[in-house]
Amino acid sequence: MAKRTTKQRARAPDVTRQKLLSAAFEEIYRSGFQAASLDRILAKAGVTKGALYHHFVDKAALGYAVVDEVVKGLLLERWLGLLDQHTGDPLAALQGVFRQRAASLSADEIEFGCPLNNLAQEMSPLDERFRRLVDATFGAWRKGFAQALERGQADGSVRQDVDARKVAAFLVAAAEGSYGLAKSANSRTMLRSNLETLATYLDSLRPAPRDGRQTR
């Protein structure tokens, strides 16, 4: 029993840190980083200000950790995590991801948009470290899509003349732009339509069959 209690106590700081990150993410997502209230974060997490400053030297350090440890994981799981779950050729898998995202949009995504895109627009011009962390997440997302397209080229499901990195960058930019437009319009229909259109666009990357008919 003593060993178990010691282990639980040793893990307590990690639990506190995760509570702070979770509460900070929710506050930043809804209010933006600059307007985010440390008092509301502390109340949501149920911890003291001393506990906050034990883990993070200031609000900026908390924000950096939110991007690197919460937003990055959330976005990559929503896109690349789904991609790993799909079977079939890589292009069909990418299409499945866009269609699954279109079918499972949350109310928060429509009202508040994409948390990564929000921080990119708010903080990248103001804070270089924020900019680098946000860009690294976009970079990982682009890389995951590019690798899928390259696998498609290797198995013959994607045309050889396709520039995988450029198309991946376009897909990420188009998806993020769609989230921004849907947020402004408060329109789930718009976002679903745009994501479905991107899925349909991917058919154009397939090689033309010998009889000249486009395949899906």
Image (tube, grey):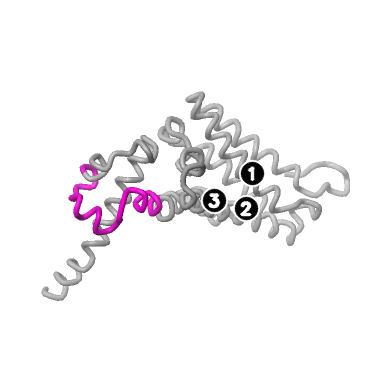
**Magenta highlight on residue 64:** yes
Looking at the image, tell me whether mark 2 or mark 1 is earlier in sequence order.
2
Residue 104 seen in render: no
Residue at the image point whose x is 19% and y is 67% from the top? 8
* Front of the two marks 1 and 3: 3
* Quarter occupied by the C terminus: top right
Mark 3 and mark 1 in contact (Cβ < 8 Å)? Answer: no
- What segment is highlighted magenta in the picture? 43-66
**Magenta highlight on residue 117:** no
Residue 126 lies left or right of residue 168; in this view the side is left
> Could you say which quadrant of the image residue 23 lies in?
top left
The residue that disc 2 covers is: 145
The answer to whether residue 19 is above or below residue 189 is below
Residue 184, x across and y down, in percent: 50, 26
Q: Nearer the viewer, residue 140 or 193?
A: 140
Residue 111, x across and y down, in percent: 43, 30
Residue at the image point whose x is 60% and y is 33% from the top? 194
Looking at the image, tell me whether mark 2 or mark 3 is earlier in sequence order.
3
Q: Amino acid at mark 1?
A: Leu
* Quarter occupied by the N terminus: bottom left
Residue at the image point whose x is 65% and y is 58% from the top? 147
The residue that disc 1 covers is: 171
Badge 3 element? helix
Q: CA distance from mark 2 to mark 3?
A: 15 Å
Report the disc number at residue 135: 3
Residue 106, x across and y down, in percent: 43, 36
Residue most extreme to the left: 2
Residue 21 lies left or right of residue 107; in this view the side is left
Q: CA distance from mark 1 to mark 3?
A: 15 Å
